[in-house]
Image: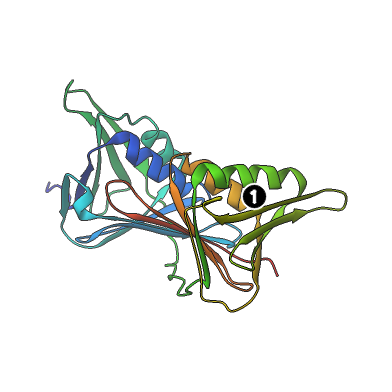
Amino acid sequence: MLGRLLMFRISYPNGTKFKKIMQASIKLIEEIPLNVTTEGLTLRALSPDKNALVNLFIPSTSFEEFNVEEETNIVVIKDEFNKAVRRAQRKDSVILIYERGARELKVILFNAKTGVEREFSVSISEAGMEPVGEIKVEPVVKFQIDGDDLKKIITDAKIVADEIEFIYENERILVRAASEDRSYRTTLELDRPLLNLESAAEGRVSGKYSLDLLKGITTALGSAETLILGFGQNQPLRIYMELEGGGILTVWIAPRV
């Protein structure tokens, strides 16, 4: 009996980095659609409530091995994938293998120094998912901030409310959150603590967003990342991060009007 045709075999050289990238990317979604082409690996999916869109791209050049027979689209079960990937360590290569018609994705963690290989089978969802398009909106206001600083803001705001408002005015970002009896306010300016701030707007611009979604993604991103946030008047909030080793993670969060 002939074996199945290999659709792709790709290997990422650092298990810890791959784990961090993936755990941040899948935090807000329930199933994981993977698109693998000769250009790289893409993950694009909506959160269950459709209020967040996650878009991850890792180029083929970031992998130590990238063997793709043809473009492949599969949807893997989140819990199973996460259980496999979270076992990865820094010296592990993370190898993903998929064969045409297979009902599972093979995830292999291989330590070249010790020769230890651990293999996991991750189930493929038979239901599949409808393709999700990209959001083609260019934010009017953009600001760059350390992940730690943003995480503190989100944590403090979450104590008092379930939504946060970003306001651009007079070359600064005003942050507001309020409930019936409590409120939170802070001001972000260039070098205090913003690393960069730019705006194409002539006047005041504001947007309100879910703190639950923001807390979910900032917690998953870790502490050492630099993020670029962008928003417009009642437009989606864009969180943009360039990944160490190559690649881009973008998260869009719908506005609350």
Q: Is residue 68 left or right of residue 191?
A: left
Q: Residue at x 31, y 46 (%)?
A: 244
Q: Residue furthest right?
A: 181
Q: Residue furthest left?
A: 2
Q: Residue at x 37, y 49 (%)?
A: 124
Q: Is residue 243 left or right of residue 94?
A: right
10 Å crowding of disc 1: few (<14), some (14-19), many (20+): some
Q: Which residue is mark 1?
A: 212
Quick check: can you spot residue 40?
yes
The residue closer to the viewer here, 93 or 98, is 93
Question: What scheme was used to colour the molecule?
Answer: rainbow
* Number of dots carrying numbers: 1
Please provide percent x and percent y for residue 12: 24, 42
Q: In the figure, residue 92 lies in which quadrant?
A: top left
Relative to 168, is 101 above or below? above
For mark 1, give the secondary structure. Answer: helix
**In the rendered image, which quarter contains the C terminus?**
bottom right
Please provide percent x and percent y for residue 170: 63, 68
Q: Residue at x 40, y 33 (%)?
A: 86
The residue closer to the viewer here, 100 or 169, is 169
Q: Residue at x 19, y 53 (%)?
A: 61
The residue closer to the viewer here, 13 or 29, is 13
Please provide percent x and percent y for residue 69: 15, 58
Q: Is residue 218 left or right of residue 73?
A: right
Relative to 152, is 144 above or below? below
Q: In the figure, residue 35 lies in which quadrant?
A: bottom left
Q: Residue furthest top?
A: 114
Please provide percent x and percent y for residue 88: 33, 31
Quick check: can you spot residue 5?
no
What is the three-letter code of the residue carrying label 1?
A: Asp
